[in-house]
Image: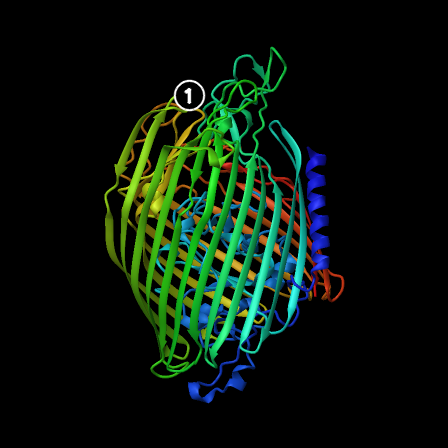
């Protein structure tokens, strides 16, 4: 198998390299020594207020960057004022809307030099408090965890790629509601910025955890770049021993011609993945050998009898972004993204019959759930019109949509003798699932640009639609053989409308008060569930249809921030924000079975009400900063997914409102260039979170081992580790070389409300881990750059329910045309 995987990976690389060589004028991206077209916002100089009539078309032509990407004025109280490193400047959205959050950022050049970047989400790897649950290269279920919310909280952060929301607010989980990172080609990223907390009225209550802003690099002149990356991961765990190879080709190209600028990017990934799940049994099956004795996370016998999902994924994505100057001060942009995924999984059994010596499933039906063919084609569209007068009034108008053009998973219904599968099966569809977002925003400056008041306001609307039927088929691997027999169906819709305002008021040149609020109205409608029972052959014996009741809620969320600069080097900011996070359509209506885990929706969920406050104290230099943050958060009616064991090998995930939880803690982060010696950058962060469940009147759980009633009150909040820490150094002896060593640590976390999952380092557990990464970056010429890296240098083996990647060797080459 090793030779097979290696040959396929290398052949893909060779073919892709040949294709790129023959079309080098078409595909592109920037090298480590980025060409002048890279949009890394420079340290800005505060321009004089101007009237729209003053700017001419000729003057407008001097800045070909979109309004949102031009250098923004640095006013008193803005972070990193006067800094020489672009990533220390506030992102364009913060400066444009005077957002109250402190931010942390990284540019494409810094990513190139310090991170083994294989997927877009890798860019946040060393940002304070953040963790992406990325199980393998090309993972399409990678969730962003923040300082106070964990790996199952996809709807508690907002992630934007330019003006497109790539957070899938269709649900709140780490499966089909994960962010759509795959729409982004790594070579199209200009910079990435993170804003903590729900402190800006411009964002909905899903910003409880924070907001991640990914900006593309629109060109000023012709450019093209291509990058090839290969990663190799040897793997030994339980009965699986193999080497998994991933090859990835990324390209980008762009230009500006008069009023029109354009950027196209593409990405192709061919990934062989380590086991994502394992198949377990309450006992070692009689008449077999090969099982591995083991426990599950709560201490019950759960012997490992084989892999579950063992997948090969082929993904292709493409993006087009156009920007056109409607006038010298108004620009329109259009973005189109398409992502395709073809994934197959073929589970491996460890069992052998003692009678024949041959491999066998021994009739364990969960092997059938891990055998599948999954085809997905998704498309996104976004259009934006915005002004940049820097006068009395500016505006943004935007609309976006995301559509599942195809999303079909084919499974056999059960297993047969030996290692066979039944001919009949199931077809699970999510085709037709879609969502839309629309916003109209304005900025009013009654005293002119940079005046005492900047008032921003807006109107928002969104709609999320779920379509998720499962049908029977006579031939499981052919969708065309559908019988029309419905095994299950989940459907429904949510809608939200909002009005918001904010006033950034400079009380003094060094003192700014920001007040705002957001009024939201939400409803859930058209919910329906169909549940069936079937015999072992797949014949339905009973069926039940339930039309779920509609829900509605209207809420107001106040925001406040006070920022003070004692002098040019220090800043103190106090933030407060209330946020209301509404139940998603999947939390309300989607019932689904994946492997040996059943997920049951709750159509009676109430909105979460969150109160967050923080104190930031920051010392900044031209090439670095240190920040101390104290934070406290209370959430009423927190919607938490609770996974309980039905028996030793099967679990059920349900959703419920936990009456009250509290999280408080401290975050210390630092980033400084030229430490001790010139060219040595040191960065790191430490975060401690004291999380506690304050009240949960509906809890009625029992200890899985003793059957004694348990309590959730006083226990730690699920999926929130107590400690997170990151530390790294990058040494740049000259412009051609960069050497990085970085480490990441996460403490123990629980996945049960009563914290009964006490067994570590077993499949299904949530372990602490310590991982060290290395990277060497070399600019061989003006056009060629090469990378060599190792992720998880010491081959730490740990589980976050799934087994996570071991030691991985990464080799990459980039050519800039």
| Pointer 1 residue | 536
**Residue at 38% across, 82% down:** 451
Label total for image: 1
Residue 500: image quadrant is bottom left
Q: Quadrant of the C terminus?
A: bottom right
- In the image, taking residue 740 as reference, residue 516 lies left or right, namely left
Residue 204 image position (x, y, % from top left): 35, 59
Regarding residue 695, the answer to whether it shows in the image is no
Which one is nearer the viewer's eye here, 525 or 727?
Answer: 525
Q: Quadrant of the N terminus?
A: top right
Residue 601 image position (x, y, % from top left): 33, 39
Colour logic: rainbow
Vertical position of residue 370 compared to residue 33: above or below = above
Which one is nearer the viewer's eye here, 564 or 107?
Answer: 107
Which one is nearer the viewer's eye here, 260 or 244?
Answer: 260
Residue 573: image quadrant is bottom left
Report helix, strand or loop for mark 1.
loop
- In the image, taking residue 44 as reference, residue 248 lies left or right, namely right
Residue 699 image position (x, y, % from top left): 29, 35
Vertical position of residue 616 compared to residue 754: above or below = below
- In the image, taking residue 31 as reference, residue 725 lies left or right, namely left
């Amino acid at each position: 198998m090793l030779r097979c995987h290696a040959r396929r990976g290398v052949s893909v690389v060779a073919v892709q390299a040949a294709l790129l060589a023959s079309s080098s004028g078409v595909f592109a991206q920037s090298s480590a020594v980025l060409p002048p077209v890279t949009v890394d916002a420079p340290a800005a100089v505060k321009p004089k207020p101007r009237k729209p009539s003053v700017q001419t078309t000729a003057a407008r032509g001097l800045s070909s960057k979109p309004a949102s990407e031009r250098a923004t004025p640095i006013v008193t109280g803005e972070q990193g004022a006067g800094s020489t490193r672009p990533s220390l400047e506030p992102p364009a959205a913060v400066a444009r809307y005077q957002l109250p959050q402190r931010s942390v950022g990284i540019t494409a050049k810094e990513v190139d030099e310090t991170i083994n970047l294989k997927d877009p989400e890798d860019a946040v790897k060393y940002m304070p408090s953040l963790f992406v649950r990325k199980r393998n290269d090309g993972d399409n279920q990678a969730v962003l965890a923040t300082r106070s919310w964990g790996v199952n909280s996809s709807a508690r952060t907002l992630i934007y790629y330019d003006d497109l929301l790539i957070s899938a607010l269709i649900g709140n989980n780490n499966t089909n509601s994960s962010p759509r990172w795959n729409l982004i080609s790594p070579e199209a990223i200009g910079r990435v910025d993170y804003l903590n907390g729900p402190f800006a009225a411009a964002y909905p209550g899903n910003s409880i955890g924070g907001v991640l802003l990914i900006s593309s690099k629109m060109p000023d002149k012709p450019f093209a770049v291509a990058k090839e990356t290969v990663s190799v991961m040897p793997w030994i765990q339980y009965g699986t021993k193999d080497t998994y190879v991933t090859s990835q080709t990324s390209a980008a190209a762009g230009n500006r011609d008069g009023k029109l600028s354009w950027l196209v990017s593409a990405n192709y990934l061919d990934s062989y993945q380590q086991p994502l799940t394992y198949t377990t049994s309450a006992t070692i099956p009689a008449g077999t050998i090969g099982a591995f004795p083991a426990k599950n996370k709560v201490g019950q016998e759960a012997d490992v009898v084989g892999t579950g999902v063992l997948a090969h994924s082929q993904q292709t994505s493409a993006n087009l972004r156009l920007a056109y100057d409607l006038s010298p001060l108004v620009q329109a942009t259009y973005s189109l993204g398409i992502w395709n995924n073809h994934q197959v999984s073929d589970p491996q059994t460890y069992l052998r019959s003692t009678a024949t010596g041959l491999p066998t499933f021994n009739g364990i039906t969960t092997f059938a759930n891990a055998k599948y063919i999954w085809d997905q084609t998704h498309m996104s569209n976004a259009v934006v019109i915005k002004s940049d007068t820097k006068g009395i009034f500016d505006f943004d108008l935007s609309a976006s949509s995301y559509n599942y053009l195809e999303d079909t998973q084919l499974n056999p219904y059960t297993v047969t003798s030996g290692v066979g599968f039944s001919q009949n099966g199931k077809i699970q569809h999510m085709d037709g699932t879609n969502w839309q977002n629309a916003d109209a925003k304005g900025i009013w400056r009654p005293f002119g640009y940079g005046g005492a008041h900047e008032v921003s306001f807006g109107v928002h609307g969104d709609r999320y639609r779920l379509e998720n039927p499962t049908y029977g088929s006579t031939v499981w691997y052919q969708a065309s053989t559908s019988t029309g027999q419905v095994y299950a169906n989940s459907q429904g819709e949510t809608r939200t409308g909002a009005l918001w305002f904010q006033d950034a008021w400079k009380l003094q040149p060094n003192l700014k008060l920001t007040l705002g609020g957001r009024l939201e109205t939400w409803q859930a409608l058209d919910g329906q569930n169909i549940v069936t029972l079937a015999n072992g052959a797949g014949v339905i014996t009973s069926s039940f249809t339930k039309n779920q009741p509609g829900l509605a809620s209207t809420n107001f969320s106040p925001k406040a921030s006070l920022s003070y600069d004692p002098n040019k080097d220090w800043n103190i900011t106090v933030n407060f924000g209330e946020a209301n996070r509404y139940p998603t359509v999947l939390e309300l209506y989607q019932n689904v079975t994946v492997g040996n885990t059943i997920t049951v929706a709750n159509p009676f969920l109430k909105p979460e009400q969150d109160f967050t406050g923080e104190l930031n104290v920051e010392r900044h230099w031209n090439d670095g900063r240190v920040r101390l943050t104290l934070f406290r958060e209370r959430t009423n009616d927190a919607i938490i997914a609770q996974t309980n064991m039905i028996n030793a090998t099967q679990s059920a995930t349900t959703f419920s409102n936990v009456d009250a939880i509290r999280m408080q803690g401290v975050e210390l982060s630092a980033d400084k260039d030229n430490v001790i010696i010139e060219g040595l950058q040191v960065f790191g962060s430490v975060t401690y979170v004291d999380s506690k469940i304050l009240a949960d009147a509906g809890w009625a759980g029992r200890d899985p081992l003793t059957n004694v009633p348990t309590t959730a009150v006083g226990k730690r909040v699920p999926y929130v580790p107590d400690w997170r820490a990151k530390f790294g150094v990058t040494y740049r002896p000259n412009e051609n070389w960069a050497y990085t060593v970085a480490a990441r640590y996460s403490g123990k976390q629980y996945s049960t409300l009563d914290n009964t999952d006490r067994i570590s380092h077993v499949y299904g557990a949530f372990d602490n881990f310590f991982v060290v990464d290395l990277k060497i970056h070399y600019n061989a010429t003006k056009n060629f750059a090469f990378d060599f890296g190792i992720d998880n240098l010491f081959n730490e083996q740990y589980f976050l329910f799934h087994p996570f990647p071991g030691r991985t060797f990464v080799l990459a080459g980039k050519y800039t045309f």
